[in-house]
Each structure stands twice: as C-alpha cells, then as structure tokens.
Image (cartoon, coloured by chain):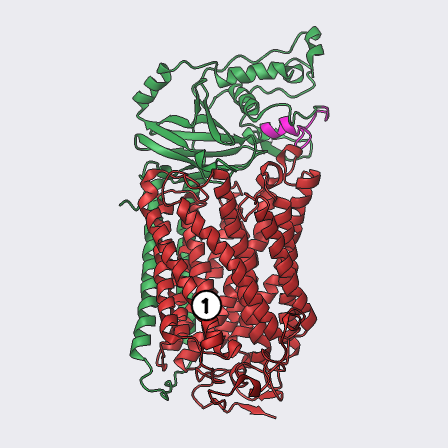
Amino acid sequence: MSTLPQTIPESRRPKNYLNAAYGVRSWLLTIDHKRIAILYLIGVTFFFALGGLAAALIRLELLTPAGDVFQAETYNKIFTTHGVMMVFFFMIPGIPGVLGNFLIPLMIGAKDVAFPRLNLLSWYLYIIGGLTALWAVIHGGVDTGWTFYTPYSTVYSNGWVVVTAVGIFIAGFSSILTGLNFLVTIHTMRAPGMTWLRMPLFCWGMYATAIIQILGTPVIAITLLLVGAERLFHLGIFDPAQGGDPVLFQHLFWFYSHPAVYIMILPAMAVISELVTAFSRKPIFGYKFIAGSSIAIAVLSFLVWGHHMFVSGQSVYAGLVFSILSFLVAIPSAIKVFNWTATLYKGSVSYQTPLLYALGFIGLFTFGGLTGLMLATLGLDIHVHDTYFIVAHFHYIMVGGTIMAYLGGLHYWWPKISGKLYPEYWSRVSAWVIFIGFNLTFFPQFIVGYLGMPRRYHAYPEEFQVLNVMSTAGASILGIGYLIPAVYFFWSMRYGKDAADNPWGATGLEWETPSPPPTENFPETPIVSGKPYDYLTGRDEVAVG
Amino acid sequence: MHFFPEEASTFARHVDGLYLFLILVTAFFSLLIGTLVVAFAIRFHRKSENEVAQDVHESGVLEIVWTVIPFGLTMVMFFWGASVYFRITRPPGTALDIYVTAKQWMWKLQHTDGHREMNELHIPIGQPVRLTMASEDVIHSFYVPAFRFKRDVVPGRFSVAWFEATKPGKYHLFCAEYCGTRHSNMIGWVYAMTPADYQAWLAGGAPGETLAASGAKRFVENACNTCHGDQPGARGPSLTGLFGRRVQLASGQTIVADESYIRESIVNPQAKLVAGYPPIMPTFQGLISEEGLLQLVAYVKSLSPAPAAGAAAPAPVPAPTPERKASRP
C-alpha cells in the first residue's frame, strides 16, 4: 500500500497538487480539478455555515410559542435565508462541486475534466451567485421563502427578490456547466479499459445528476427571470389581477425544484455506494441495478412535480397521475437501499468513521424515503401538506441523507484530498453526535406536523411547545456535531499524520495514486482490465502501462 | 402527549386509518433495514486486518423480489390514498354554503343569511359545509387539522371545497400557505355545533342583509340588469335558473354553470361566451372586489329553482327603465 515514509520533510516530498505551486494566484487561477474542488470546499462550507446560523436562529425563535425573539418579518427573512443558502449554495453544488470535481477524473483515470477552464468558471459563477444572494441578505433580506411563490414574490413582497433571483440565476449556470463538464468527461475521458460497466458507481451517480443539472436548471433560470421581469415590468404572467396564473409559477418552479431534490440526493447515494463496498471489502451487490436505478431516478424525477400542488386546486386526474408517478420514483431508491444492505452481508465490515456515516445515511434515508410515500399518498397529503411533517420529511432526505453522505465521503477521501489523517476517535464521536442530534431535531417535527402545525410560522399555539423544545434541543446537539469535524479537519491539515496512498485498503483508481495526488493525477495513464470493487481476487486488475 | 389531532370530520377517520397503515409500513421497513444493517455489521465485523469478505453471488431473484414487493405496496398506498382523496373531493348533494374571503392576514367568512364572521366560523355538525373561497391578494390556504381539511385559496379564481364536521368543539383554523409577514397570525377558530346550538347561534346574532340581497344590490350598482334583466330581447342571457345548468357556448362546447364559470364570465366575459349572444359585455376585472364577486355569485345562485342554502331568495331584479340605462359605467 503506502510507499511513503511518515516523516519526509516538506521540501523533499514529491510534488503533489497541493505543493505544486504556492500563493493566492495559484489557487484562484487554477484549472486543476483537485484545486477547484478545494475552492468549492471553501465555498460550500462558508454557505453551509451561513445557512446553519440561520437555522440556529429559527430554532431559537421556535423555542417558545410567542414570536418573541425576532419580529415576524425578520423571522421570515431568516427562514428564507436558511432555505436559499442551504438549497442553492450548499446542497446543489456541495457533493458535485467538492467530491465530484476531485474524484471523477481520478476514478476514471483521466488527467482532468474535459473542460478545465469551464470548470473554474463554474466556481466563479457559483461564488458570484452566492455573494449576490448574500448581498441581498445583508441589505435587508428577502422574505418569500426559498420557493418564491407568486403573486407574493412578484407583487407583495418588499424584500430583495430580484437580487436574490439574479444570484440563483447566476449560480444556475454554474450548475449547468458543472453537469456538462462531468457528462462530457465521463463520456470521453475514461482510461483505456474503463468501460461503462467497469466505472465506479460514484461516477454513475454523478452522471445521472449531470443529466438533471443540464435539463432542469434552465427551467428554474427562466422561471426566476420571469419573476424578476414581472416584478420590475409588471408583465402579468403570474398576476391574477392582469389575467395571469399564480399556479403556473408553481408548475415551472417545481419542474426544476423537484428534480433538484435528486441533484441533492443522487450524489449522496453515489458516495454511499463507494463507502459501503470499501468498508465491507466486498464487491457491491447488484452493481447494474444500482447504476440503472440512478438513471431511472434521473428520468422519473422530471415527471413528479405535480405532487407539490395536491391542494392548490389542480384537477383530480392530474393529482392521480402525479401520485402514481411519485410512487414509482421511490422504487429505484428502495432497490439501492436493499443492495447496500446486501453488500454488508458476509462482508469484512470495519467500523471506521466513513462507514458510521454511511450506515447513518441508510437508516435516515430509508425513514425519510418512507415518509415521502405518505406525501405521495393523495388522501394523506391533503392533511400534512405545508405542515412540519413536510419539513421533517425533506430534512431526513437532505440533512439525514445528503449531509451524512457528504460528511461520510469527506471522511473517506480526506486522506486522499489532504494527504493527512484526522483523529479517528473524534470523527467517530462526530458521527454519533450528528446522528443523535439529527433525530432529536427532526423526529418530533413529524409528530407536530401531523398534529397540524403549519410550516413557516413565526408564532405557534402553545400545545405544540414540547415538541418544538425537543427540536431546538436536538438542533443544538446537531450544531455541535457539525463543529467537531470542522475543527479536526482543520487541525489535521497541520498536525495530522501523513496518510498512506490507500489507507483503507480500498479498490478504485483514486487509491492507486499518491496521497495527495500529483497535479497530473497519474504518472502514466492507467489501463483498466477488470470489474470495479474486485475485493475478492486481489487488486491486480489495474496495470500501469 | 397526543399523536393525532382530534377526529372531527367525516373523513378524519379515513385519513388516520391510511396514516396508520403507512406508519406500519414505514416502521416495518425501517426496522427491517435498521436491524439487517446493524446485524450484518456486527456478525461480519472485521476481526483481523487482513480478513477478506466471503464470495456472495448476485441474485436476480432477490433483485426482482425487492423491486416487486415495494412496487406492490406502493400501489396499495396509491389506490387507498386515491379512494380517501375521492371521498374528500366528491361534491356533497346539498350543503351549507359558506363564502370565504382571504386577505393578508385575516379570514372573512360569510353565511348566506347575512351573518359575517372574522377569523371565526360557526357551523353545524352532521351537515356538509361547502366553502367557496376567494383571495384578495396572495395565495392562502384554509386548513383545519381536526377536519384533515386543507385547500389553497388562489387569487383570481374561486376555490371550492367541502367538509362535514362530526363532533362539536372548537378547532384551529390555520393559514397553511406562506402569505407574508403576519402569516402565523392568520389563524382563527372553527366552532362546530350541534344543529340546535347552531340554530340558536344564528338566531342570536343580528345578521345584515342576506348575501344574495347584497349581491342583488351589486347587480344593480354595476348595471348588470341592463342586459341580464330577463326582459324580452335582452342583450345578455337570462340568469334565472342558470346555476347548475348546462350552458351551450358559442365555441360549440357546453359547460355546467358553477361558481367558477359565473366568476369568469364577470371578470373575463369573452372567455366562455354563451351561444347566440354577441361578445359585447365589458370586463369587470378590478372593478368588483372579491367579496363583491362572491355576493354576485350568491345572488345568481339564488335565482335557481333549488337554492343550495336555506336563505330566502330575493326576487330577480327587473330590467331597468330606459332612463336608468345612463347609469351604466
């Protein structure tokens, strides 16, 4: 495995992508996919911290029934900030931007992505978009919720709707370009012998994500442009006073934003497929089914948007069609969960931190997905629509799912990314703290939602207080859980032990190259001659030629 | 601690039954996956650093099994959910009509007999209540958790929905669609009462004029009766007996004249023109408030042979005498 002694002084170390060049310029003008991944890591961590701060303020306000901490308008701006930052500037760019950028070329044996300069442009568009939205927050905020429902957003809101929409619009191009880059990279830059069915499942997941990014994002871009135009020029597309249709906005918005949920979860599933195999030391169970289910999810995700309009007066027949399609999109997710579980069977399972996160993901995602079935069920959705039940459900998917997977992936590939090891004890502690804090935060919200507490309420009836106190207590634990990895990742960069090239004994081309990898990734182009995850016949499927 | 809100409508029980079934499915699969994951992790824990996994062959049968079983279960959920949904959306035969106007940030509720309420609604149990709802500004949503009832109130159209309370009590009314600054203050109470109590309540207050009578006034104010006044050779079709009837349109289609059709014919008269009449009616978009539109609809409804509610129908307003025609806006 490792060929690197632990104590080579910095100056005598072989060149890698981190020490290949120094200085701010070498980072801000880099076209190395690995450095761009680090830039994304900084960006998404920043926006995650902002979104997390907003979440903390929300939970603070909801500790008591009365709206006593913030004014109603301030509270509305806080939850909008939370949603906008987390969805558009953390969740959507998160795993693709950081792990996708770092790993796709490494995993397929390429030197970089297909369009390295475009890749850097993606990051700049993302940051410009994020800062534009942040400008709006600082200059008074926006109070429409991240969903921008018309005609509130177009006629009645006094916030910086247009500026925020422009920020999201710009970041949308970042998402499209990233998707395009990954798609072309996977199609054209696979190493000799890396056939589609020899590709790691992470790449399959990112490929499916790219399809949604490319096809879906233009729709939200156009929709937000229309909101901006309507606000500025009173076009009347969504304004009923001018004969427009406010529900049309919901159709357009969710035509992107429901698939966008899969932009957030498909990369997470992609990470989990890698983690489960690596820590079971066993070929993944049902490779083709997991790969195929990613593509199935990408396709079906475009056909379910109408389940967001079950109570908005959509026709009964439209409701039926969207209900049945929403059930269908759950099947590929179920297939993945069963295959991950089966992969553990008769494996050689090691409880290292990435696996703890992965197992946490499987549990929380399963529960979140099953509660999603309740929302696809017409007769039940009528009652729980727009209540805390929904809030609980999608946080199980996004926080319990995506963030668990993101952190699991970061722990798994951190030795490769940084060349350093983090303290195993504290990382296990963080996984447990996050798991416990998460459940305490969001499980009570299912109950309070079914009892009828609507979402986006600044003040609420007293009988809901106990459950809200539990939720706030959980959020405090969750916040600490997120701080712990932030501390030890930083710490490890300076004080961590040097990582071996393949500290986990895992398969995959990314582990065949030094930690951290050289700028060109591989000294010589690898040639792939076997299936991925070939843990049983040794690791000689890769010949370097 | 409660896990269910009060079951106080005819469909609450059905929604809760469906919910219980889904809870069981969720609990079963969560426990199944959770148990298997933990059991496998413990049973197959790596004992020595070099331990390798055992060879497990992939199984097409297993893949089919865990595709077909979830599919079958989701179809059960779909059909069960759809049947409850039909129960909720199926129009009742006769119902007590309540007219709702939502605006930032209050609910105005009007009974046909003229009782008006603000953020409070008194209704009898054991009788379907039909809500005809309009919004004066943004989207709101009329939500009564105890009735498992929710319906968005979208501006620019009527939202019509119904429920039937079964249990006397005082229940939360929430606005469930985010509607701006004081969204969480757009709340109120629904008082479900026994029919006797309800009659006493009706008798107790001092109702203003009936909704249909208010509508009749608006009918004259806006000079609707100039053309729709039942006079021979009138320029517009007669409205007597119109509500609930099938109307032949100029486009060749037919449509049942319901609340939404009448509303649309006032604000956008050319959209569904009645066959045999020229497209001469001007639009009243923006000229009549949502409340006024509800009153006009209540008036038109009252001209039909079997008015939905018990309120006495005012006589049709006759066509104006020629000199009054000048008052047309």
Question: Dominant secondary structure of the magenta stretch?
Answer: loop
Give the camera-side residue of A49 and A182.
Answer: A49
Count the marks: 1
Q: Colour of chain A?
A: red
Name which residue type carries label 1.
Answer: Leu
Asked if one can make out residue A453 in the rendered structure from this viewpoint, the answer is yes
Q: Quadrant of residue A233?
A: top right
Residue A356, percent from left and from top: 38, 71
The residue located at (40%, 55%) in the rendering is A371
Q: Colour of chain B?
A: green
Q: Is residue A146 left or right of residue B142?
A: right
Give, as a single range, the part of the protein colored magenta: B263-280
The residue located at (70%, 6%) in the rendering is B323
At mark 1, the secondary structure is helix
Residue A106, percent from left and from top: 57, 79
Magenta segment includes B276: yes
Q: Chain of mark 1?
A: A
What residue would you read off at disc 1?
Answer: A407
Q: Quadrant of residue A350?
A: bottom left
